[in-house]
Image (cartoon, rainbow, N blue to C red):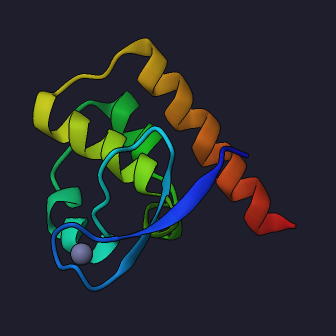
Amino acid sequence: MAITFQQKCMRCKKNYVTVSRRQNYAICYDCQKGELSGKISDPNMKKMFDIPEECYKKNSFLRDIKLKYLRQGELTDKQIEVFKKVADELQADDKK
Ligand SMILES: [Zn+2]
């Protein structure tokens, strides 16, 4: 697993968010919840983002990718690949 650390949410300055070293900002699930519920019309993307809500709560990277897609309407192949990998890992962890 990547190295992660706790950082205070930049928006509410109340909740802590787990971020990886590559992320230079942190916003908690509560603050992003509204934006994350945006509509996705592409069936493939819809399927990819259809993971347990818990995963989005736990992982700010997954939220970040979903928000990017909702804002820009597209993702790079690399972003899609990493999203799937992280989502799989999280769900595998839960089954342990
Ligand atoms: Zn917050």
| Residue 74 placement, left or right of 2 | left
Outermost residue, bottom side:
14
Residue 85 drawn above or below residue 9: above
Residue placed at 21% from the left, 66% from the top? 10
Res 41 seen here: no
| Residue 91 placement, left or right of 52 | right
> What percent of the width, then of the height, locates residue 18?
49, 64
Outermost residue, top side:
77
Residue 81 drawn above or below residue 12: above
Viewer-closest of 96 and 48: 96
Outermost residue, right side:
96
Viewer-closest of 4 and 86: 4
Residue placed at 41% from the left, 45% from the top? 49
Residue placed at 81% from the left, 66% from the top? 95
| Residue 93 placement, left or right of 88 | right
| Residue 2 placement, left or right of 25 | right
Res 54 seen here: yes
Give the quadrant of ligand 1.
Answer: bottom left
Residue 29 picture quarter: bottom left
Residue placed at 33% from the left, 45% from the top? 24
Quarter holding the C terminus is bottom right
> What percent of the width, then of the height, locates residue 3?
65, 49
- Number of numbered markers: 0
> What percent of the width, then of the height, locates residue 8?
34, 73
Viewer-closest of 30 and 23: 23
